[in-house]
Amino acid sequence: MISGCSIGDKIDKATDTVSDITGDTVAALDNAIDALDRNSSSWQTVLQETTQKLTTDAQSTVRNEISDLLNRSVAATGTELRCNMDFIGSRVRQALVRIRARLLHQPIPPVEPALCHVVPAAVDMALDANRRNKLEFFGYDFDTTPIKVTLQDQSRTLDVSSHLDRLTHYHMTLNLGANGVPISSASNRLTLEWQDRPISSIAVIQPATPVCEEKDEPISPRAYLSYTPPHTRGDREYSGNGPEVWANARLINEGTHINFRLWMKAKETRSDWTTAEGEKIISYYSAPSGYRIDRIVAGYAESSAHYVDTDHNDDRQGGGPNGPVKEFVFRGDRSGDDAGSYTGVDVYFNPVIVKLVKVANCAPASAIKSLQIKDLISPTTIKRMQPMMFRLQPQP
C-alpha cells in the first residue's frame, strides 16, 4: 500500500511536470503569434527568440520544428521569390498555429500552397524554343500537398503534372522543352490547380492571341459582420483585467471570388490569462461569369486594430478609409462571463474596387508588360499587341 502511494505520487508529479512544460510551450507559442499579429515582418526575430525560450529536453521537438521553420522561411526570401516580408510573416504565423494545435490535440488547419511569382508570366510561341523551354514558380509550401498542372488546347485539357519538378518547397519548374509539356500551335493556356481550384493561369500567346479585356468593378460594402470568437483559455471572466484586444481583417483574392478573413483575440492582462480567439472566413464577392479577379485596386486589402479595454462600454477602434474595414466596434469586458459568449466585434465595411480580366484565349496586359521587362516576348508580338493594349488601357 505504501509502495503504491509512493508510485502514485511520482506519477502525479510527473504529470504535473508534463502539464507545466506544455503550458510553458503553449505560452511561448502564444507570445510568438501575438508578436506576429502586431508586426508580421518581424518573423525572423520572433522565431529566434522563441527557440531561445524553449530550453528543456521535453520542448526539443517543438524547438526543432521552429528552427526548421526559421531556416525554411529564410531560404524562401532568396532568388526571384520576392514575396514581401509581411507575406512570409503571415505564413510563419500559420505554421506556429498548426504547431500549437498539434501540441494541444486540436484540429490542425490545412496547409495551402501560395504562389507569389511566375517566370515568364506568359509563353510567347513566337520566341525561339530555347528561350521558352521552362516556367518557374516561386511561392511557399509547394511540398505539402499535390499540385496539378493542366494544358488547355482548342479541343482538350491535358494533365501535364508529370513535367512539374519541385526543386524546393518555394521553387518549382515546369519543363516546356522537347521532352516536356507538348505545347503546340493549338495551345491556349497552362493552369496550376490545388484541390481542383485554379491558383494560377499562364497564357500561351499564339499569332492571333488578343490582349484580355479589363474593367474596374465597384463592390458595394456589406452592412456589417458580427463575430464572437471562441473561448480558448482561462475561466471566461476578464474581471476588469483588460482584455488586450487584437483584430485583423483581410480580403483574400481567390481568382474567381474574394474571401473576407476576420481574426480576433482578446486576452486578459493578468491572472489566468482568460482568452477568446478565433477567425471567421466568409465569401465576400464573386466575379461575374467570363471574368477573373486580377487584383483589388481601391484601398488596401487589410485592416487591423489593437487596444486595451478599460470599461464595460463598446469600443470603436481602427478601421478608416484605407482598408476593407471602415470601423471595428468591440465588446470586451462586462459583469459575468465574457470569453466565448459576449466578447466580440462588429465590422463595418468600406467600398472596394476590383480589377476584372476577361477569361478567354487571351493574354493579360500585365503579363505582356512583365515579358517586355524580362525580354521574353518577341518584337513581332509586341508590335501586334501594342495597339490593343493602348485601346484597352488608354494612358491618362
Image: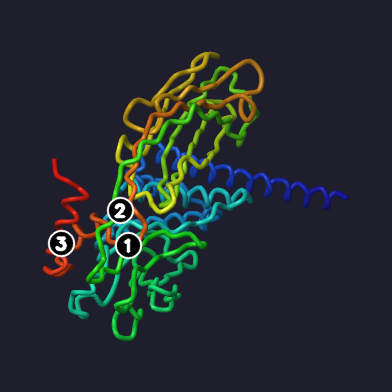
Whether residues under marks 2 and 1 lie with C-beta atoms below 8 angstroms apart, the answer is yes
Tell me the CA gap for discs 1 and 3.
20 Å
Q: Which amino acid type is marked by label 3?
A: Gln
Give the tally of numbered discs. 3
Circle 1 residues within 10 Å: few <14, some 14–19, many ≥20: many
The disc labelled 2 sits on which kind of residue? Cys
- Distance from the alpha carbon under mark 2 to that under mark 1: 9 Å
The residue that label 3 is drawn on is 372
Q: Nearer the viewer, residue 185 or 376?
A: 185
Q: Position of residue 222 (x, y in %)?
A: 47, 30
177 sits to left or right of 108: left
Pointer 1 or 3: first along the chain: 1
Label 3–label 2 contact, CB within 8 A: no
**Badge 3 or badge 2: first in the primary sequence:** 2
Residue flagged by tag 1: what amino acid is it? Answer: Phe
Residue shown at 31% from the left, 41% from the top: 216
Q: Position of residue 214 (x, y in %)?
A: 29, 49
Which of label 1 and label 3 is nearer to you? 3
Q: Specify the quadrant that holds the C terminus.
A: top left
96 and 180: which one is in front?
A: 180
Residue 291 picture location, percent across and down: 38, 52
Residue 32 in view of the camera:
yes
Disc 2: which residue = 83
Looking at the image, residue 356 sits to the left or right of residue 285; the answer is left
Which residue is depicted at the point 42% across and 70% down?
149
Extreme bottom residue here?
179
Crowdedness of circle 2 by 10 Å Cα count: few (<14), some, many (20+)?
some
Q: Which type of secondary structure does the marked residue at label 2 adopt?
A: loop
Image point 36% across, 35% down: which residue?
352
Residue 68 in view (yes/no): no
> What residue sits right under mark 1 in the picture?
138
